[in-house]
Image (spheres, grey):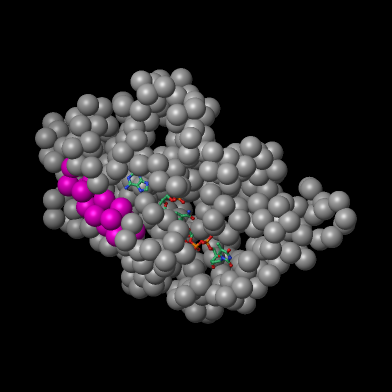
Amino acid sequence: MTILVTGGAGFIGANFVLDWLAQGGERVVNLDKLTYAGNLETLASLQGDARHVFVQGDIGDTALVARLLAEHQPRAVLNFAAESHVDRSIHSPEDFIQTNIVGTFRLLERVRTHWGSLPEQDKAAFRLLHVSTDEVYGSLGAGDAAFAETHRYEPNSPYSASKAASNHLVRAYHHTYGLPVLTTNCSNNYGPYHFPEKLIPLMIVNALAGKLLPVYGDGMQVRDWLYVKDHCSAIRRVLEAGRPGEVYNVGGWNEKPNLEIVHTVCALLDELRPHADGQPYASQLSHVKDRPGHDRRYAIDAGKIERELGWRPAETFASGIRKTVQWYLANPEWVAHVQSGAYRDWVQKQYTAQDALQ
Ligand code: NAD
Ligand code: DAU
């Protein structure tokens, strides 16, 4: 048996592939375009492991996707591939439209054709799991109830609008064609191998480098944080037992304002790697211009996935953020290669064309 994972060289996809194989899951075909966010160095421990087949390519490449489906006959497709950074979507939305909307559409089309050709038993067992975000629901006021799956869509950035469009397409392929899809809308993830353009890893690497810690606006925007390995366990559970056509919200029950996050990171660094001159890391904090259209608050009601599938996060924020800071301190080479851009040469340096790219 095989699963096809897209975007499996990115932050969440790579954590998922590593966890999946560590837990004895079946073979993974990993299709990733290797944009700036794709990092094969994250998957270095799988080099030479026959259970992991990496293929560099685009989810929008219909011929390639058709070939992979025919050749590997996966029992499920898990779509992590996306442009994922809100700030980049504000500066240049085009790639977000191409990958998140057009790419998802083309992937759905190829999967639909493949699924339609399967024998009845395989057809019934097949799943397409689409990994999405709480940002499709827009922004909450301070006293509003957390996002349930029935909350109206109100995306506010080009990123969240493109993810909302992809969710609608996935839904339509179930409703119209009966494709057995599952959608997960998750809150903010953090943990190992997180690209340091996002809040938590950026604060850790900037703090260690003696740089400013840029907090947008007043820093009182609220996010609901989930340790990435808990997101991976939720996806495994939804794949295993989720009902086709359903949406599951995934969150950590950890609402925190950004300023608190930054102070927590600083306090952990003060404890684990204090500055030689005794200065607290928080002295590097700097309020900067706000993100345009910045959503004020996200909060996930993860009650459905708990009630129906028995999933709850294993980590508290305190335990997850400590593990995360410790991971960054223990992996300076991974960080340095991301910062220098050397991670992009990893394929050439570490793999031959035959054993890495097909
Ligand atoms: P990421 O940006 O770290 O990784 C995305 C991966 O997709 C990269 O490896 C990239 O090379 C690949 N990719 C991009 N375009 C592609 C294409 N056209 N074809 C094939 N591969 C392509 O993103 P992430 O943080 O790991 O997020 C993964 C998914 O989870 C995304 O769909 C995102 O919307 C969703 N999500 C992320 C978070 C979060 O906090 N990071 C939270 C909820 C949902
Ligand atoms: O909610 C889920 C989403 O979480 C995912 O769908 C996205 O893919 C993921 O990138 C993340 O989006 P955010 O915009 O919430 O994450 P980011 O890390 O970019 O920002 C988190 C908060 O921190 C947000 O309020 C903006 C703020 N911020 C961010 C950066 C990078 C700062 O104050 N300073 C910064 O330098």
Judged left or right of residue 226, residue 55 is: left
- Give the x, y percent position of residue 71: 22, 26
In this picture, which residue range is highlighted in magenta?
96-110
> Which quadrant, please, contains the N terminus?
top left
- Taking 216 as reference, is 48 above or below it? above
Q: Is residue 112 left or right of residue 29?
A: left
Residue 16 versus residue 178: which sits nearer the camera? 16
Q: Main secondary structure of the magenta part?
A: helix
Identify which residue is drawn at 23% across, 57% down.
169
Q: Is residue 101 magenta?
A: yes
Relative horizontal placement of residue 313, taking residue 135 as reference (left or right): right
User: Residue 11, can we see it?
Assistant: yes
- Work out whether residue 151 can be spotted: no
Which residue is at 13% across, 55% downward? Answer: 176
Q: Is residue 117 left or right of residue 65?
A: left
Q: Is residue 109 above or below residue 30?
A: below
Q: Where does residue 24 sit, x and y in percent of width and height?
A: 46, 26
Tell me: residue 144, above or below residue 197.
below
- Foreground residue among 333 and 72: 333
Q: Residue furthest right?
A: 277
In the image, residue 145 sits, relative to residue 281, either above or below, namely below
Q: Can you give x and y, in whole percent of width and height, for residue 212 in the image?
A: 69, 63
Q: Residue 36: where, in percent of width, then height?
A: 45, 47
Q: Quadrant of the C terminus?
A: top left
Which residue appears at 71% of the width and 67% of the height?
285
Is-magenta flag for residue 162?
A: no
